[in-house]
Image (cartoon, helix red, strand yellow):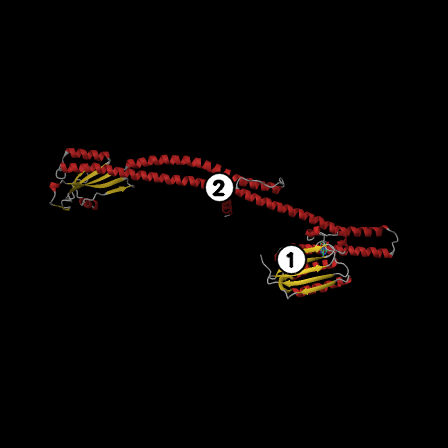
Amino acid sequence: MKEKLNQYISKSKVVRSLKFRIFFIILLVGIVPTTILRYGILQNYEKRAVDVRISDVQTQFKILADHLITYNYLKDPSSEVINAELDQLSNLYDGRVLIVDSNFNVVRDSYGISQGKTIISEEVIRCFKGESITNYDPVNQFIEMTTPISAVLEENGGETAAGPQTQENLVRGVMLTSVSTDSIAANISILSRRATIIQFLMIIVLVGMAWGLSNILVEPFERVSSAISKVQDGFQNEPVSVPDYLETEHIVTAFNELLGRMKVLDESRQEFVSNVSHELKTPITSMKVLADSLIAQEDVPLELYKEFMTDIADEIERENKVINDLLSLVKMDKTAANLNIELIDINALCELILKRLRPIAKQRDIDVILESKREVSAEVDEVKLTLAISNLVENAIKYNNEHGFVKVSLDADYQFFTIEVKDNGLGIPEEELEHIFERFYRVDKSHSREIGGTGLGLSITRSAILMHRGFIKVESEEGSGTTFFVKIPLTYIVK
Ligand code: ADP
């Protein structure tokens, strides 16, 4: 059973191979027409040969029929001339001739078997009515035919067993002939043997041609797969090129594009890993320095201990923040299937976010206002959207001046809702704007670090918004303030 299954799998593998299919098609295209041609020609030859033989025999026997009347053979079958002629014809065509008179008596049988007997067969009766019948039996290889022996005019009239004779119906007797077609069959067999040899030679040539052609035609595809394997094994780094066919070019172009994307992904992964390590190492290095300096000193005053321990606690806090942000980012990077979509009251959501952040704003006397232009309910993931908007408002507070303001406006049309987070804070230099959504990117590294930034906030925000099939853009002027615009569909679009 298992063996059979394995056999089937290996067989189906062969059948599935393009090389085999090309080989098979070429073979089929070569063999089918030649086979049809062979049978067509042989059959045509047979039909033609039989027709020629029939017409030959008919002519000969019509002449003989005339002689039979001339020599009045039906009444007196002793004519030596006719008998000799009969023998000659039956020898020539390797056949048998029976001459039947109008009373259905066999006057003469060239085989000498049925002489004197009576023959009443359909063919004979029909022949008496003037119908000449020809039958070819390809199995037993003979032609059977009837030839009427017609009288000349002055012999017309009178009654015969075959029916009343009129002027038009002057049949006096019937000649029943069976002629062998052995010679035709022999010719066909010779021709067929030759055709078989030619066909066999053709098949050998075709197999060679099909094999060669299938190899040549499939070769570029094999080169594509070997080039891809080389890239996979790391032996080749350059883009693959197999321009032989349009198809191979398409495959190779698609592969090169994929390769390029994978390279970019790999580079960004490496950069991310090095950034993460750096971000995680910085607080640890600080803590180590602080701890080492405490250990190195003898009789350290308690205040210094307290101060250094506070710094260490700050660094731990920072480390914790980076790790939390990284976890949020990883969650955002996962597929949209992880979204927990619900119909949420966005006004209430914004209200809650601002309520949570107001105490921080208050520390620097920053005014946080919510402007709800209409009631908005939308299908969103509450946790992820809260994180996204919180980050924007937090940034607007963080990168603001004392006594500044943050204004959050909520609006909607029939398809989207928009949230605008505007501040009159530090602003972002124009050349930095395109980078602020990158992971770990901070405009002013030391300032951002000072106020507890990880550089991950905006990438988390952007990922969350993209997951909702929305988009985010920023406008900013250094020294004047920044505005973030967010637009998200009211109904979640499943792709
Ligand atoms: P961070 O944790 O440093 O705040 P983000 O990804 O949230 O990281 O922001 C990236 C950088 O963009 C910040 O370091 C800051 O320089 C700049 N930025 C973000 N929001 C504002 C804003 N409202 N005003 C000015 N600069 C901002």
Q: Give the residue drawn at x 33%, y 34%.
A: 190
- Front one among 226 and 493: 493
Residue 150 drawn above or below residue 332? above
Helix, strand or loop at disc 2? helix
Q: Residue type at mark 1?
A: Ile
Residue 48 showing in the rendered view: yes
Instruction: Specify the label residue 465 is tagged with.
Output: 1
Q: Position of residue 469 (x, y in %)?
A: 61, 57
Q: Quadrant of residue 92?
A: top left
Residue 106 drawn above or below residue 351? above
Q: Quadrant of the C terminus?
A: bottom right
Q: Give the residue drawn at x 26%, y 37%.
A: 53
Q: Position of residue 65 (x, y in %)?
A: 17, 38
Q: Is residue 32 left or right of residue 396?
A: left
Instruction: Specify the label residue 20 is tagged with.
Output: 2
Instruction: Specify the label residue 428 is tagged with.
Output: none
Residue at mark 2 to residue at mark 1: CA–CA distance: 52 Å
